[in-house]
């Protein structure tokens, strides 16, 4: 084993202590990940089309990813050695399908790379997601290219087998020394607005083991409640973007949803069923309480440990660090680098 790979594995192992039970491991492939990660760092190359003079995005997390990418060693000036091609354009929420078609048409005419794969080795940023259209250029962009979106994604504008969601920016993080078993004052915690269903909120308010906020808490109180709760309850929607904050404190996320969720961050890497609890809303607070009681008996400590470990990969840094959110998004792109390239020919 080479020295870089040994160092890479040791850094990765610092996330997962050797004493951690297998059941607490949040990864699909804990032994393969550090090896492939090192290969990515060494080999992965991305060519970006000419950068515009100004470029603004809908969200801070998009801007942070863009800045990290452009200044990273993944960028190459030689398109022939590139695994993927980045489209440096702001596909913002107000962009019309016609404008998207015009953009792709320009790349198709001026460069040879789009036609080689019909855009399958291209990726772009769009927090809200690109809408559907009948123009061929939009169809290929939507169907073939990798869309990187904000989590949670816009319904019907995210294609799970190819698209990637950005881990949300966290406003708070648990202290580095906050490891091991936690003592909990509450079985469950619902921050203000995490659950919007008024009937469900009323039911939860009647349970003495569930802390439900009736008004926003300050940051110190918020952190204390994250640290002092076994489970953090979220209704799937915009407020679920705080899921990484809860995980960093070992507060197991409880996602209340009546449909499958296919846009969770790092879904190629993390076993979310080992990290979070997913429960429907139809059974109300009684069913949620029953599910949580079962988890407490069957494997809460493992889930809490997995959540805390996985949260380290959801952290964004102004200067990217190993295995952080930026590098894990890049790893997901690395996994998508294998595409079919068509013979070059003239396209109508």
Image (cartoon, rainbow, N blue to C red):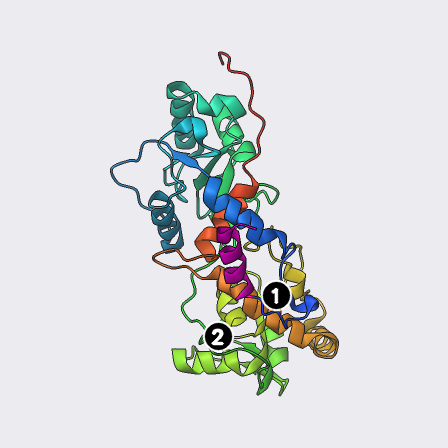
Residues at badges 1 and 2 in contact (C-beta under 8 Å)?
A: no
Instruction: Locate residue 260: give its quadrant.
Output: bottom right
Residue 174 among those drawn in magenta: no
Q: Relative to residue 107, is residue 3 depicted above or below?
A: below
- Please provide percent x and percent y for residue 343: 55, 16
Write down the region rendered in magenta.
Answer: 1-15
The residue identified by callout 1 is 255
Residue 8 among those drawn in magenta: yes
Distance of label 1 from label 2 (alpha carbons): 15 Å
Of 289 and 22, the residue lying toward us:
22
Mark earlier in primary sequence (1, 2): 2
Per the rendering, the mark at residue 300 is none
Q: Residue at x 48, y 74 (%)?
A: 192
The residue identified by callout 2 is 192
Q: Relative to residue 214, is residue 340 depicted above or below?
A: above
Report the side of 48 relative to 227 (left or right).
left
Report the side of 159 relative to 106 (left or right).
right
Instruction: Locate residue 79: give its quadrant.
Output: top left
Q: For the residue labelled by badge 1, is the local secondary structure a helix, a strand or a loop?
A: strand
Count residues near mark 2 (Cα–Cα under 10 Å), then give few for <14, some for 14-19, many for 20+.
some
- Please provide percent x and percent y for residue 333: 51, 43
Count residues near mark 1 (Cα–Cα under 10 Å), then give few for <14, some for 14-19, many for 20+.
many
Residue 24 visible (yes or no) = yes
User: Which residue is the extreme one toward the left?
Assistant: 53
- Please provide percent x and percent y for residue 120: 53, 31
What is the magenta segment's predominant secondary structure? helix
Q: Residue at x 54, y 66 (%)?
A: 15
Of 157 and 49, the residue lying toward us:
49
Q: For the residue labelled by badge 2, is the local secondary structure a helix, a strand or a loop?
A: loop
């Amino acid at each position: 084993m080479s020295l870089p790979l040994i160092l890479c594995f040791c850094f990765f192992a610092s996330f997962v202590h050797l004493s951690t039970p297998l059941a607490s491991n949040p990864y699909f492939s804990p032994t393969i990940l550090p090896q492939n990660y090192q290969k990515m760092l060494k080999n992965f190359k991305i060519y970006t089309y000419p950068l515009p003079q100004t470029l603004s995005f809908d969200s801070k997390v998009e801007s942070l990813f863009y800045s990290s990418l452009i200044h990273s060693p993944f960028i190459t000036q030689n398109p022939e050695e590139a695994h993927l091609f980045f489209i440096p354009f702001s596909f913002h929420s107000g962009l019309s399908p016609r404008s998207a078609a015009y953009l792709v048409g320009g790349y198709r005419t001026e460069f040879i790379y789009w036609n080689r794969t019909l855009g399958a080795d291209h990726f772009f940023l769009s927090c809200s997601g690109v809408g559907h259209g009948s123009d061929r250029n939009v169809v290929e962009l939507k169907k073939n290219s990798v869309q990187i979106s904000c989590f949670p994604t816009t319904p019907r504008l995210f294609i799970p087998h190819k698209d990637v969601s950005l881990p949300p920016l966290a406003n708070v993080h648990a202290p580095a020394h906050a490891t091991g078993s936690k003592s909990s004052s509450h079985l469950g915690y619902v921050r203000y607005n995490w659950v919007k269903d008024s009937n469900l909120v009323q039911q939860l308010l009647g349970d003495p083991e569930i802390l439900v906020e009736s008004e926003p808490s300050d940051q110190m109180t918020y952190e204390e409640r994250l640290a002092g709760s076994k489970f953090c309850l979220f209704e799937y929607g915009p407020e679920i973007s705080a899921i990484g904050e809860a995980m960093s404190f070992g507060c197991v996320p409880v996602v209340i949803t009546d449909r499958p969720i296919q846009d969770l961050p790092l879904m190629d890497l993390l076993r979310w069923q080992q990290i979070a609890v997913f429960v429907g809303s139809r059974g109300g607070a009684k069913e949620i309480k029953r599910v949580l009681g079962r988890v407490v008996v069957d494997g809460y400590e493992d889930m809490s440990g997995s959540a805390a470990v996985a949260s380290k990969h959801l952290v964004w840094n102004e200067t990217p660090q190993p295995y952080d959110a930026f590098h894990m998004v890049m790893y997901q792109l690395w996994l998508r680098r294998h595409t079919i390239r068509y013979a070059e020919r003239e396209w109508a």
